[in-house]
Image: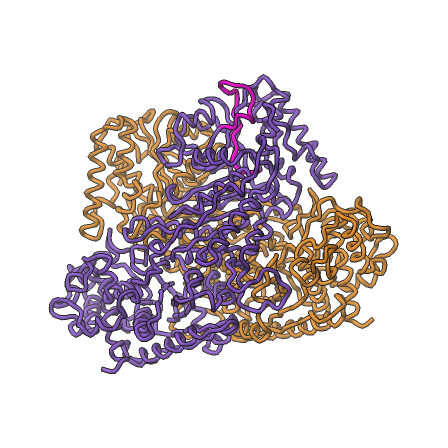
Chain colours: A purple, B orange
Amino acid sequence: MSHPEILARYRRACDYLALAMIYLRDDVLVRRPLRTADLKPRVLGHWGTCPGLNLIHTGLNDVVGRTGRRTLLVTGPGHGAPAIHANLWLEGSHADRDPALARTGDGLAELVRRFSWPGGFPSHLSPEVPGVIHEGGELGYALATAAGAAMDRPDLLVACVVGDGEAETGPTAGSWQTSAFLDPDTDGAVLPILHLNGAKISSPSVYASMSDDELRAYFTGCGWEPVVVDVTGYDDPHDPRADRAMADALEGAYRDTGQRRRGDRLPMIVLRSPKGMGAPDRDAAGAPLAGTFRSHQVPLEAAEPDSMMLLERWLRAYRPEELFDADGNPEPDLLGVPPTGELRLGSVPESVGGALRRPLPLPDLEPYAVDVPAPAAVTASPTGTASRLLAEVMRRTEDRRDFRVVCPDELDSNRLGAVLEATGRAFARDPGVYSEHLTPGGRVVEVLSEHLCQGWLQGYLLTGRHGVFPCYEAFASIVDSMTNQYAKFLTMSRSVPWREPVSSMVYLLTSDGWRQEHNGYSHQGAGFLSNLLTKRPEVTAVHLPADANCMLVVTGDVLAATDTVELVVTGKQDTPVWLSLDEARAHCRAGAGVWEWAGTGTGDPDVVLACAGTTPTIETVAAAGLLRERAPELVVRVGNVLTLRAISDPATAAAGIGAAEFEHCFGAAPTPVVFAFHGYPSAVHELLHGRPDPNRFHVHGYLEEGTTTTPYALLADNRMTRHDLAADALRRVRGPDDPGAAELERERDRLVEHAVREGQDAPEATTVPHLARGAA
Amino acid sequence: MSHPEILARYRRACDYLALAMIYLRDDVLVRRPLRTADLKPRVLGHWGTCPGLNLIHTGLNDVVGRTGRRTLLVTGPGHGAPAIHANLWLEGSHADRDPALARTGDGLAELVRRFSWPGGFPSHLSPEVPGVIHEGGELGYALATAAGAAMDRPDLLVACVVGDGEAETGPTAGSWQTSAFLDPDTDGAVLPILHLNGAKISSPSVYASMSDDELRAYFTGCGWEPVVVDVTGYDDPHDPRADRAMADALEGAYRDTGQRRRGDRLPMIVLRSPKGMGAPDRDAAGAPLAGTFRSHQVPLEAAEPDSMMLLERWLRAYRPEELFDADGNPEPDLLGVPPTGELRLGSVPESVGGALRRPLPLPDLEPYAVDVPAPAAVTASPTGTASRLLAEVMRRTEDRRDFRVVCPDELDSNRLGAVLEATGRAFARDPGVYSEHLTPGGRVVEVLSEHLCQGWLQGYLLTGRHGVFPCYEAFASIVDSMTNQYAKFLTMSRSVPWREPVSSMVYLLTSDGWRQEHNGYSHQGAGFLSNLLTKRPEVTAVHLPADANCMLVVTGDVLAATDTVELVVTGKQDTPVWLSLDEARAHCRAGAGVWEWAGTGTGDPDVVLACAGTTPTIETVAAAGLLRERAPELVVRVGNVLTLRAISDPATAAAGIGAAEFEHCFGAAPTPVVFAFHGYPSAVHELLHGRPDPNRFHVHGYLEEGTTTTPYALLADNRMTRHDLAADALRRVRGPDDPGAAELERERDRLVEHAVREGQDAPEATTVPHLARGAA
């Protein structure tokens, strides 16, 4: 056979296997007439995209074998999992991970049975599947993930399939601009393969409705050089001319990616193929199938006899008896098609990033710490302090090139600019305007797309590297859904024995809501934090360092963490430093603790002032100061929460502190606790469930009140000023009619009036009153 | 003066006003030497985009005046608010809404002072600003919003400015494909104006780095016909040649939009202008300003004398004395530039959609209701039932054309296909493949982009129409952030006296997580619900109708609601109908209630089984059946929650039921409550805060456990089967060692083993056991 004919035959085997996986549980090579008992009782899977994926995968096998170029495959249409499984089995990547999936008749039967079966392989690609760094269940992120995987891997080629549906998503549409950020000298190549089969679940697809000229124009405009491979004209789904066309396109693309220079357009392929290619033309009721949206998922409901006959004919059309021997072993010629060893798409080392990951060379924290003679004696910027540590990590990884900062153009405005002294911004084009810190090979990537930042970092981390994602707090919610999916990926990865831990996804949320009084209401909100709490506690952590030293310790911790999503929310302004480095270390270890120097009196407290977050901590310490002046007889305890799940019942979250520590920090029930919280009060309410008498906690937080105003007035709108906290404390102890509380609220109102009149806060609205016990 | 000169002069006035708004609080026409006391103490605002916005706005004034074509302006760079305010003031739209902003010296002083001042105008566009239907704080949604505003308004032209930064966002990149959905016969025109000024906050912009040819190719490819207007070559920021070029481009675009035919490319404009055009070349320290990223926000920190001198020179460069008379009134020639009445961009009727809104012609529910001889005697699909109602609403609005369904290609798969019998899918191109239900003028819009769906619907609702957004539950989180911003917009709108209520944003989340056992883990999650709970209770509502009749009533209610975000989560499968239509009506009114027929015994309950959501309700009724068999002596009460905030403390949410109703529904403390909840247990935990003894509630829900499996096995993974609920109830009453509970769990494990062995659930795992009291 000629070469394309061999590829077509291989592809036929893959198509057959994919179809068998969707339908069959027994007699997987249809040696006997099809019976109901041979069918899976619940038929799940997506056929529509599988034949096209097999054409691509087979073509990649061929070009990788011929060029020896290590290639990672990111499959956007992860619901085409049967196609990928077929290839992984034939190339032996499955067998390497699990001997039960050997390339034998038994292995074949196990593969087919295990797909979409309870306890077996999920219907979508997932971390259980070799070679996979992207699930493709929620569409939109394949291309960004592929680009992240390619960064700082100049030898790697990352092929990325984008389907009709995914192409329509905003994140994918934005990801095409990744071409502006990939440096030909320091980064690998991304080879997008836009797979158009004309239809989605039940509607035509937008990109497929574009003419070839329109597609060429669109992609040329954003930095790609598309080659259109159109296989819609062949009657035979395994016409070798299709393989020839794909081979030619891939060969050209591999050649061009190898020779690319700065400013060149990057190769890409547009594949037009009939949806569900190879399916019967019509179903038993006469509705059209092949080439239409009706072949998207399971084209034939095989339950009734007419459909079963069609299905049997369809299965036999692949002539499995020519592809597998009497024992079910694949014919030897098939085994010669895929590359071998680490060149197999399912066995590329980069797809198991944890095995390649080297811990970051973190410096000692001491040189970066703020010297604190007494609590609040000095001020410092939490992010500014952390940025010097990040800059040093950037320097120490200059040769390794395995640490990046991705950011939606907010590095400078978040006081993280020190990082730009250690590296530059990546930009692979002539910007055409005055710019600063643009450096070829720079490892800061700034694009005004949170989706792109997130996708890049996912790809980068999952291939064994490290990174940080600084972001405005309110706008992190843009990637709520991506974070959800990534947390799911990590959750599943943890139970896959051959997946080793990857570096944690680290978000640094600064420009937090309380200091977005200038940008206004749209910039205020802590919903990202709340969303993260819905994830499993072992996979996510929320840190709210209240000062520069705590931030430093937290930053060191999260850079060393693995297999989690770590959220750090802190301020960028110069704010009081409460703890020395050693105190900060102890505080971070505990997760929450009492700040005795901020309280008043000893023994059982009359009231506890608790706080979490930079601004709430300032207000709380100030509120404690007000209480000391106005109600010196009260025993007031001040507790600070650094890692949010410390307040959880330890029965539900390992980070929850023990009952004794909890009582030490927050007093014994029914001591009232006035809790100043950085985000929505509901986050604290939910975490307290299960702790004794949770209703004694009176949580102040962001109540979705805000506009462009002064910092104090924004706090007042949300009843979170020092005066509100102190007033609440007085009322909880002395009763609702306490005149001291009313006086504090009048003071608050006067300070708000001052802000409205003068356009700025009065000094007493923002300074921290003197601390107790001779500090500061 | 020639016409362009008049426009340039007008624009100079707008630029001056914008600059004054950013810096000045007094002597707003710099009649005397600039003093610190004349400056705002906190200088807030974004200069960078203002001069370009003024060029566009002035040009639009001109073309609207000449053509008489009603034009709505959507400003993506909402942080360019000073430019828009300047225009609104000069055209008198501000004065019409607020006499204090009259076109006089006093009005001018008030305008300038009020911008970015506590209690004044926010620094970004917001609902307080006339003509605004989009805030532009979080970037990405302007173009989709503009397209939604244009739908079904064939006479309207919606101009939409997209800035450098916004262009990089995924949602915007995806929104360019809106060209495929706008029908020239039934929809208005969208005129995008891509405003490239080269830089973002501190990085160069990707789109500005594209050549004119690349930009033309890119936009031509996706259905637009771009005209590039380049004003970067003029020394004078008010060179009339810039106005001439803009006028020519706009004239052509207005002409072409008026003549467009199906399949034509749509006009758009690309404006290249220097960032911060008109700013000083360098700041006092010598850093470059005009034309660079350094003029993005406030280019000069005016605090020190050298900067103040530069600022004064800059202000005077606009020669305000030529533009405003001695009393501060604008010179009469300026007043002649904008159009008048409803043609003014700030006074277009469509920008106050509430005033145009007509309530939907909702039919009586009776013909659509399911007849229920006894609870669970029949089954029906909740979404299928609602879809017939939606279809009728679609029919009744055929002439009015003010109701749409937007959906990410999931209408059919969510059993809402009946709607397609009443209207078709919009698609303005030849799809090139076999398709069904594509109809010119169809009012179903399906695109695989939740962002685009959401943006379209926002624009549609805010201009006075109605719509519904059905979506897979897990993927609704893709628009978490858009929903946050939209809820903020609604929250602010409510306090603006001239904004009348608009129709509520209605989400129908189907294919809910519990029935995504086939699509697997990535498709499972109820985070959208949890995120919505962080919003203010008067602006958001969450409904969990547990059967078809409840769904019908809820659907009618949410279609009539205004100024809120209404979330409806329900199932699509045929499931038991528990309530008659009348019972469903009463249940919806109450928000939560006892289902006596599902419980056992009378009097004070030993345990309460509570539930919310389609699947949890089935499991709960089944658990009550198990308890009736296994522990007939127990008094078991069953309560169902339909509107989630019914369980909230009424002190925090108006929807919270009173203490007596709460006790009726859930028993008196400390009666244990086993609560089967549709989403994350944390959502119930947070809402219960403030209710007596919240720890007596033991909430079962989605614990982020899942894969491709059977429905029962998915429930078992999350401890939410009927057996888990009944076992928990037994333990709460009888203690942790109750043998009956252990037996129930063994039954659960046997049923899971059955699922793994057989590939499907045993009948007893999914059927509802007989009900008490002779029902069904």
Q: Residue at x 44, y 73 (%)?
A: A267
- Location of the N terminus of chain B by quadrant is bottom right
The stretch in magenta equals A594-614
Q: Is residue A608 magenta?
A: yes
Observer able to see residue B669: yes
Q: Is residue B473 left or right of residue B52?
A: left
Q: Is residue B194 left or right of residue A44?
A: right
Could you say where residue B89 lies in the image, as x and y percent from the top left? 75, 55
The residue most toward the right is B326
Quarter holding residue A600:
top right
Q: Is residue A66 above or below residue A180?
A: below
Observer able to see residue B374: no
Residue in the foreground of this view, choosing between A26 and A542? A542
- Location of the C terminus of chain B by quadrant is top left
Count of numbered circles on the image: 0
Could you say where residue A203 lies in the image, as x and y percent from the top left? 41, 66
Residue in the foreground of this view, choosing between A713 and A466? A466
Could you say where residue B771 lies in the image, as x and y percent from the top left? 26, 38
Q: Is residue B199 above or below residue B104?
A: below
Q: Is residue B200 left or right of residue B119?
A: left
Could you say where residue A319 lies in the image, as x and y percent from the top left? 18, 74
The residue most toward the top is A633
Q: Residue at x 83, y 52 (%)?
A: B30
Q: Is residue B287 left or right of residue A125?
A: right
Quarter holding residue A577:
top right
Q: Is residue A176 magenta?
A: no
The residue most toward the bottom is A2
Q: Is residue A94 above or below residue B772?
A: below
Residue in the foreground of this view, choosing between B633 and B141? B141
Q: Residue at x 20, y 44 (%)?
A: B751
